[in-house]
Amino acid sequence: LRNLPVHDTVCVTNVGLHDQKLCSEKSDELCLQIFLQNVRVYLNLLQKVCGDIVWIAITPVFGETNRPQKNETIYIWNEEVSKIISGYSNTFYIDVWHAASSY
């Protein structure tokens, strides 16, 4: 794998589900901005080593009250990441929200 030229590689990734736990002391807007900045940094790092990038959207959670992850937040974060990704010619966004919601 190390001998492949960058343009022949594909990276499949996502982030965000665990980031919500880190935001418990922050406003929703500040947390979103921090998350989106992290996504931009991550994508820029991946650009150096990935020919193409496939970003899998964050899937919904069960909505347990003792967990910091909330579907409302996940949905907004997915929409915003999709907008960022649209600015990259070699990055593709796969929305799995509805498929994952049926389980």
Image (tube, helix red, strand yellow):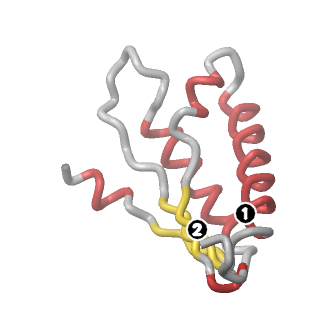
Q: Is residue 18 above or below residue 80?
A: above
- Which element type, helix, strand or loop, lies under badge 1? helix
Residue nearer the viewer, 64 or 54: 54
Horizontal and vertical percent position of residue 101 = 27, 51
> Left or right: where does residue 53 sit relative to residue 26?
left
- The residue under the point 57% across, 57% down is 79
- The residue under the point 75% across, 45% down is 38
The part of the image, by quadrant, that contains residue 53 is bottom right
The part of the image, by quadrant, that contains residue 25 is top right
Q: Is residue 85 above or below residue 15?
A: below
User: Closer to the N terminus: mark 1 or mark 2?
Assistant: 2
Q: Which mark is residue 46?
A: 1
Amino acid type of disc 2?
Cys
Q: Which residue is mark 2?
A: 11
Residue nearer the viewer, 12 or 84: 12
Query: Neighbour class for label 2 at 10 Å: few (<14), some, many (≥20)?
Result: some
Horizontal and vertical percent position of residue 45 = 79, 59
Q: Is residue 69 above or below residue 55?
A: above
Horizontal and vertical percent position of residue 14 = 55, 54
Q: Residue lying farthest front? A: 3
Q: CA distance from mark 1 to mark 2?
A: 8 Å
Q: Which mark is residue 103?
A: none
- The residue under the point 29% across, 54% down is 100
Amino acid type of disc 1?
Leu
Question: Do the residues under discs 1 and 2 have CB atoms within 8 angstroms?
Answer: yes
The part of the image, by quadrant, that contains residue 19 is top right
> Left or right: where does residue 100 sit relative to residue 49?
left
Query: Neighbour class for label 1 at 10 Å: few (<14), some, many (≥20)?
Result: some
Horizontal and vertical percent position of residue 65 = 36, 18
- Which element type, helix, strand or loop, lies under badge 2? strand
Quadrant where the image shows the N terminus: bottom right
- The residue under the point 60% across, 64% down is 82
